[in-house]
Image (cartoon, rainbow, N blue to C red):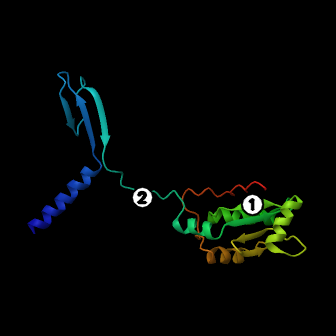
C-alpha cells in the first residue's frame, strides 16, 4: 500500500513539474541562480523558461478522415450565375459539413467544357458535384449526403472549419 501511495505522489509531482517555469538570473556578485520562483528585483540577465506543454489537445485543424477524403476524393462544385437558391443550398450544405471544395461557375466555354468533360451529355444541369470519379447532378441533400459519406468525408464540420470554397486553380 505504501508503494502505491508513493507512486501516486510521484506521478502528481511529475505532472506538476511537467509544466513548470524555471528562472535563471545573475546576482550583483555575478553568481548564476536557477529557481522556480521569480528572481529578486536587483537580478540581471533574467531568463524565464517554461518546461512541458499545456495540458490540451489542439482540435482546430482538419481531422485525419477529412485530409484523406480530400486527397482521395477532391470535391468540385459546378454552378452557374443563374442557379440562385439551388446553388446557395448546395454551398450551404457543404459549409455545414465543413467540406472544402473548388467551385467552377460556368460562364465561359472553357468552364462549360470542364463540366461536359466531367459529366458528359449536351445539357448543363447545376448545381452538380464531383468527388473524385463520383458525380451527382442537381442538389438533393440525401444523395449528396450519401456521396460524401461514401467518400469518407466527416458528417459534421470540425471546430474552426473555414466553411468556404477552395480557390479554383488557374486555367492552363
Q: Earlier in the sequence, mark 1 or mark 2?
A: 2
Q: Is residue 83 visible?
A: no
User: Which residue is rendered at x = 17% and y = 58% of the image?
Assistant: 10
Up/down of 162 relative to 51, above or below: below
Residue 169 rendering spot, x and y as whole percentages: 73, 56
Residue 57 rendering spot, x and y as whole percentages: 42, 58
Left or right of 117 on screen, residue 2:
left
User: Which residue is rendered at x = 21% and y = 38% of the image?
Assistant: 35
Give the total of numbered labels.
Answer: 2
The residue nearer to you, when weighing 143 against 18, is 18
Snapshot quadrant of residue 12:
bottom left
Quadrant in which the C terminus is drawn: bottom right
User: Which residue is rendered at x = 70% and y = 77% of the image?
Assistant: 142
Quadrant in which the N terminus is drawn: bottom left
Q: Is label 1 or label 2 in front?
A: 1
Left or right of 57 on screen, residue 64:
right
Snapshot quadrant of residue 144:
bottom right
Snapshot quadrant of residue 95:
bottom right
- Label 1 – label 2 distance at C-alpha: 33 Å
User: Which residue is rendered at x = 62% and y = 55% of the image?
Assistant: 162
The residue nearer to you, when weighing 22 against 71, is 71
Q: Which residue is mark 2?
A: 57
| Dot 2: element | loop
| Dot 1: element | strand
Sort mark 1 into few (<14), some (14-19) or many (20+) by Cα contacts within 10 Å.
some
Sort mark 2 into few (<14), some (14-19) or many (20+) by Cα contacts within 10 Å.
few
Q: Which residue is mark 1?
A: 103
Amino acid at each position: 500500500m505504501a508503494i502505491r501511495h508513493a507512486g501516486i505522489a510521484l506521478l502528481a509531482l511529475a505532472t506538476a513539474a511537467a509544466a513548470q517555469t524555471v528562472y535563471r538570473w545573475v546576482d550583483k556578485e555575478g553568481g548564476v541562480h536557477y529557481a522556480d520562483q521569480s528572481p529578486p528585483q536587483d537580478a540581471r540577465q533574467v531568463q524565464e523558461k517554461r518546461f512541458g506543454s499545456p495540458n490540451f489537445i489542439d482540435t482546430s485543424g482538419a481531422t485525419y478522415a477529412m485530409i484523406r477524403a480530400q486527397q482521395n476524393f477532391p470535391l468540385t462544385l459546378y454552378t452557374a450565375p443563374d442557379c440562385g437558391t439551388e446553388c446557395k443550398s448546395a454551398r450551404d450544405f457543404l459549409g455545414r459539413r465543413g467540406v472544402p471544395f473548388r467551385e467552377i461557375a460556368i460562364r465561359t466555354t472553357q468552364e462549360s467544357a470542364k463540366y461536359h468533360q466531367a459529366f458528359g451529355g449536351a445539357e448543363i444541369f447545376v448545381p452538380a458535384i464531383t468527388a473524385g470519379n463520383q458525380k451527382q447532378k442537381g442538389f438533393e441533400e440525401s444523395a449528396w449526403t450519401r456521396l460524401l459519406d461514401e467518400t469518407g468525408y466527416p458528417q459534421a464540420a470540425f471546430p474552426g472549419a473555414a466553411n468556404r470554397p477552395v480557390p479554383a486553380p488557374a486555367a492552363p
